Image (cartoon, grey):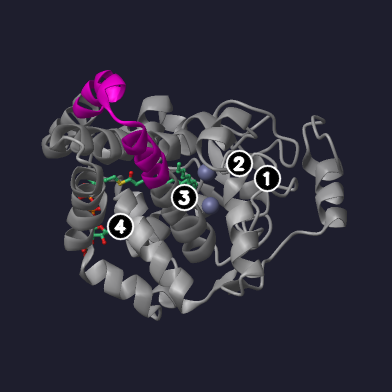
């Protein structure tokens, strides 16, 4: 049974057996009305966009899908597997591409995203976890972006080592020019390309490859924090909340194997099954084939098997 009052560290950088305990009463929840207003507006625009799908040209729909995949890779292959966990090494051209793709996804700059994500791994399911899933599905999904952070997130987060990110020029340049890059890459480019190249209306360009695509990438990402921390098997570690969730893996380009990922956060594939339901792993493999990436870290089959035996919930299909 998972311990519901404490969170155990699942990060390899921490001493085995360390336990972080939640302390003190819950501070008052401080709503951020600006974010609530903008998120309601964004989702309303995205829903309106759904009704405009029949009026869009085939090229616009293909462009919307391409924008989804590129911006999603900026999160999965970029902010997550490269910059948060350093699971592989990327060449400068690949890093620049991923930084552009990351701005297209508009989920905070790489530095802030990776900082919050490292804090999430280190203090999973405690007050110091930015999207602590013990506070319910809504909080883990979107609610955490609508309220001030728990003081523990900031206090504990300040102790997390970010020196590699500070030394990474691509990360710091993207951070310096973040707002402008988002305006251009997340909103202007997706809208203007179909208008200029094949005469799509500006409204459809703004609502489909713009707002609807952005909202879909956001929700696919948030499902990893909400659904994949609540529903699914725990073949590798039954003592932590993150689960294997195939539906989330499908919508999040392979990021739904979350029990594996929290157990072995250094593995570039975030799964023992390679490219199965995992386009991000296929993308990193392709980059290696093209000489643009190298040094993929993986966990050995023996280590997975031993872990499955020791802490798994018995649902493993291999190991
Ligand atoms: C978004 C992010 O959506 C999504 C991330 C999801 C992560 C998912 C991970 C799952 C695995 C990967 C799967 C990928 C799947 C992809 C699939 C794709 C198909 N440590 O933040 P402030 C400091 S963003 C240390 O203002 P408040 C901070 O530096 C969407 N320090 O806190 C600052 O210090 P100083 C768009 C920290 O006031 C001070 O604290 N954006 C930490 O509580 C205040 O910081 C939005 O919607 C830390 N962890 O406000 C909202 N955190 O003053 C953007 C903070 O010295 N965010 N600090 O500079 C906000 O508006 C605010 O952050 C807030 C909290 C209202 C949420
Ligand atoms: Zn992670
Ligand atoms: Zn997680």
Depicted 86 relative to depicted 300: above or below: below
Q: Nearer the viewer, residue 137 or 159?
A: 137
Look at discs 2 and 4 and give the one toward the viewer. Answer: 4
Looking at the rendered image, the disc whose residue lies closer to the viewer, 1 or 4, is: 4
Q: For residue 120, which numbered disc appears in the image?
A: 3
Evaluate if marks 2 and 3 touch, with contact meaning CB atoms under 8 Å apart.
no
Assign a secondary structure to mark 4: helix
Cβ of mark 3 under 8 A from ligand 3: yes
Which quarter of the figure has residue 200?
A: top left
Residue 53 rendering spot, x and y as whole percentages: 30, 24
Camera-side residue of 84 and 210: 210
Crowd class of label 1 (few under 14; some 14 to 19; many from 20; radius 10 Å):
many
The x, y position of residue 153, in whole percent, is: 36, 51
Q: Does residue 102 appear left or right of residue 282 in this picture?
A: left
Magenta part, dominant SS: helix
Q: Quadrant of residue 259?
A: top right
Q: Is residue 251 left or right of residue 307?
A: left
Q: CA distance from mark 3 to mark 1?
A: 15 Å
Tag 1–tag 4 contact (CB < 8 Å): no
Q: Is residue 46 magenta?
A: yes
Residue 159 appears anywhere in the view: no
In the picture provided, is 80 more to the left or to the right than 238?
A: left
- Mark 4 = which residue? 103
Q: CA distance from mark 1 to mark 2?
A: 5 Å
Locate residue 175, reporting x and y percent: 27, 67
Q: Between 197 and 277, which is closer to the camera in this rendering?
A: 197
Using the image, determine if residue 200 lies above or below residue 44: below
State which mark lies toward you, 2 or 3.
Answer: 2
The answer to whether marks 4 and 3 mark residues whose Cβ atoms lie closer than 8 Å is no
**Magenta stretch: residue 229 in it?**
no
């Amino acid at each position: 049974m998972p311990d519901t009052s404490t969170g155990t560290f699942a990060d390899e950088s921490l001493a085995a057996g360390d336990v972080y305990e939640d302390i003190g009463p819950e501070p008052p929840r401080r709503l951020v009305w600006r974010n609530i207003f903008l998120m309601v507006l964004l989702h309303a625009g995205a829903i309106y966009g759904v009704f405009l799908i029949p009026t869009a040209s085939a090229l616009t729909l293909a462009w919307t899908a391409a924008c989804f995949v590129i911006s999603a890779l900026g999160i999965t292959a970029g902010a997550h597997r490269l910059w948060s966990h350093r699971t592989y090494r990327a060449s400068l051209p690949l890093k620049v591409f991923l930084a552009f793709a990351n701005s297209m996804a508009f989920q905070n700059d790489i530095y802030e995203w990776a900082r919050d994500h490292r804090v999430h791994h280190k203090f999973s399911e405690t007050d110091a976890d930015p999207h602590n899933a013990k506070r319910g599905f809504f909080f883990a999904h979107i609610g955490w972006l609508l309220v001030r952070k728990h003081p523990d997130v900031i206090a504990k987060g300040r102790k997390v080592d970010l020196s590699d990110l500070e030394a990474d020029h691509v990360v710091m340049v993207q951070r310096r020019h973040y707002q402008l890059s988002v305006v251009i890459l997340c909103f202007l480019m997706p809208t203007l390309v179909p208008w200029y190249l094949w005469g799509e209306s500006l409204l459809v360009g703004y609502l489909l490859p713009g707002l609807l695509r952005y909202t879909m990438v956001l929700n696919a990402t948030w499902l990893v924090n909400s659904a994949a921390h609540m529903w699914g098997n725990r073949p590798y570690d039954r003592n932590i909340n993150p689960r294997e969730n195939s539906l989330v893996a499908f919508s999040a380009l392979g990021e739904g194997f979350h029990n594996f990922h929290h157990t072995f956060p250094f593995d570039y594939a975030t799964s023992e099954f390679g490219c199965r339901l995992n386009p991000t792993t296929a993308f990193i493999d392709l980059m290696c084939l093209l000489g643009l990436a190298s040094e993929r870290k993986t966990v050995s089959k023996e280590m997975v098997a031993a872990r499955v035996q020791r802490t798994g919930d018995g649902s493993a299909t291999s190991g």
